[in-house]
Image: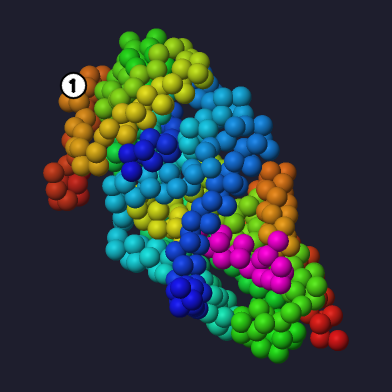
Amino acid sequence: MEKLIEILTSKHVMTASAAILAPVAGALIMGIDRKLTARMQGRLGPPLLQPFYDLFKLFGKEPIALHRPQIMYAVLHLVFMILVLILLMAGQDLLMILLVHAFSSICLILGAMSVRSPYSWLGSQRKILQILAYEPILLVLILAINLRDNSFLASKVMENTQPLLISMPLLFLAFVCVLAIELSKSPFDVATSHHAHQEIVKGLTLEYSGPFLGILEIAHFYEIAIFFGLIMCFWHTNIWIALLLESAVFVFLLVVDNAFSRLSAGWMVRYMWTVPLTLALANLIWLWS
Amino acid sequence: MTKATAKSPWVVHFNCNSCNGCDIEFLACLTPMYDAERFGVVHVGNPKHADVLVVTGSVNHRNRRVLKNVYDQMPSPKVVVALGVCGATGGIFADCYNVLGGADQVIPVDVLVPGCPPRPEAILDGILKGVEILARKKIDTEVVPPEKTIKIVRPEPKPEPADESAKAVS
């Protein structure tokens, strides 16, 4: 019995189970998101399991792809997103995780750019602007972690007994903005959105259909799970405070999503490079001194 | 899989030649008043993501190719819901010289929702009826569009010169 518990709590089993459970958690978060959004708009909203229905339906559709590289890029996007999760669980180098995550996004962009569709190109150009907007803040966050813990390893953050939020509250605010971009919430949902029919149709994922769109959906579930997991890492010492922090951020993002309209991609870059980046740099300088 | 298909109909809307009455009633289905999303309906702007094609208005010579193109881009299984009398038969425009008739002249229509325009409740009922058909359809069922004679009212275009030398002489 003790041996069984030892095996179950071993690092590899934990990592493997996290890799399997993460998309389920991501889909559930998305289901709650759609339900809460509907209630905020005075609607009944779809069932909680709607993202699962959507996903299973997509895998039951006829597979249509324009060419083979398009499929390869979709699969690579998913594979590198899973790799980000596994590296995080293994407590690896945060800089490498940042670059692997960026490469995952670049696979998505390459897939969208490999077809000759103007809306798909428009979406991928805007995704590049999104990466440009949030990547400096993530880099400053990692540099700040290095200043505090004297290491780039994710495992060192977990070993520190002081929660991350106490030493970097301003960086946390900047990170919430990054989260809004990653989850495609208004006013940052410029690259792909279910609500932007007239403007970008579906942007990045326009030319994917059926199971290949399903692969991108799974990757998005992973992304949601990873970024919400990172929010919990800001208060890793107590699980209840971490969950409270997470739900507070979640509800805040939903309110902002419903209160704001979609703004332009140029505004997004200008905003992210002024307010959140200043907050992040101020926090970095505070840690330095 | 069948259950999931029935619970997640993504709808693309195509306005053939409509007076916008049906389109406004269709958009009313998505408002908080009728809330089509409680049935999993998402209004997508892209036929490649859609399961249900909602057609409003009568088909004419100009838009029949476009309608066929939108239909062909949807991955199967897929269903077509035609809204209003124009989508069914051409309505009051049926006798116009440019009008071919309803959407069934070009693509196979599964559900007809009558009315001018139909009420949002009727549209929702029609879409859910289409979803029932959608859940029964298999991926590989080949649907052959009906072969109907298309009345030609315009004169045939003049034939192009047969070869390059003929063009150069003229």
Relative image position of residue B96 (x, y in whole percent): 35, 13
Callout 1 environment at 10 Å: few (<14), some (14 to 19), or many (20+)?
few
In the rendered view of the protein, which quadrant contains the C terminus of chain A? bottom right
Residue A81 visible at all: no
Residue name at image x 31 percent, y 46 percent? A60
Residue name at image x 33 percent, y 10 percent? B95
* Residue B101 within the segment the image draws in magenta: no
Relative image position of residue B102 (x, y in whole percent): 32, 19
Chain containing mark 1:
B
Q: Is residue A195 left or right of residue A65?
A: right
User: Closest to the observer: A93 or A277?
Assistant: A93
Would you identify the image quadrant in which residue A129 lies?
bottom right
Relative image position of residue A171 (x, y in whole percent): 75, 71
Q: Secondary structure at mark 1?
A: loop
* Residue A229 within the segment the image draws in magenta: yes
User: Closest to the observer: A184 or B129?
Assistant: B129
User: Closest to the observer: A89 or A55?
Assistant: A89
User: Is residue A38 placed above or below B83 in the rendered structure?
Assistant: below
Q: Is residue B28 left or right of residue A161?
A: left
Would you identify the image quadrant in which residue B88 lies?
top left
| Residue under label 1 | B149
User: Closest to the observer: B131 or A118?
Assistant: B131
Majority secondary structure of magenta residues: helix
Residue B84 visible at all: yes
Residue bounds of the magenta highlight: A220-240
Relative image position of residue A73 (x, y in whole percent): 39, 66
